[in-house]
Amino acid sequence: MNQTNGSLPIYLQITELLVRDIAAGRLIDGEKLAPERDMAEKLGIAVGTLRKSLAELQARGLLERVQGSGNYVRAISDPQSVYSMFRLELLGGGGLPTAEVLDVTRLEKPAELPEFGTSAEGHRIRRIRRLSGKVAALEEIWLDGSFADVVTREDLSESLYLYYRTRLGLWIARAEDHVYLDSVPDWAPEVFALRPGAPITHVLRISYSQSGTRAEVSRTWFDHDVARYVTRLK
């Protein structure tokens, strides 16, 4: 597993993958994990990297490490994750989210977007979203221009919400999703399996800041042969 510029450290990527599996119930409370060497081999990482991931899980209260016995899952009701609002999974479940930024541009907001923020301009971020290496979706995110004068590709991590919190002081407190049928946008790159104009499932998300104002609008087009949209209610 390789780390790209701007991405989370590999050990945190693995941590977040395991957190998603716990939140989704694929890893259950009390379950014993596979031996560390077997897990590391399956994930394609060094044992030392895996141990850093497991230590992070332990620090979050999601893992109990028993000397001489192994590692045991401790599922809690609300495991914290930088992907806590990410709703796409592989058809078989799970999948580590990664993102490839195609373009970041400050532009006048398109009239067809819902109203959000206080600026007439927004930062448009276009990305390819992968799940465990499989091209799953296209994303177009519009962040209100009032939060930053300039946003560059080098600024961005795999999780925009993490970037918002650590660099802009912006917390996305809640989001509202609208799911419907649309068509693949004309900027879809060759690596995306569906061609521009083809029918596709589309998610329009309106995201709200910690103060309750609309801060961001995003659009996600996902390949239903690769991914599914999942919301779990508790």
Image (cartoon, helix red, strand yellow):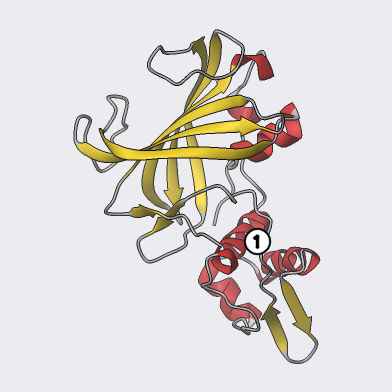
| Residue situated furthest bottom in the rendering | 68
| Quarter where residue 167 is shown | top right
What residue lies at 23% left-to-right and 30% top-to-bottom? 196
The answer to which of 200 and 158 lies nearer the viewer is 200
Horizontal arrangement in the rendering, residue 56 relative to residue 28 (left or right) = right
In the depicted structure, whether residue 55 falls above or below residue 133:
below
* Residue 79 visible in the snapshot: yes
What residue lies at 50% left-to-right and 38% top-to-bottom? 176
**Marker count (numbered):** 1
- Residue 232 at x, y = what percent? 49, 59
| Quarter where residue 14 is shown | bottom right
The residue at which mark 1 appears reads as 15
Mark 1 nearby-residue class (10 Å; few <14, some 14–19, many ≥20): many
The answer to which of 123 and 78 lies nearer the viewer is 78
| Quarter where residue 23 is shown | bottom right
* Quarter that holds the N terminus: bottom right
Which amino acid is tagged 1?
Thr
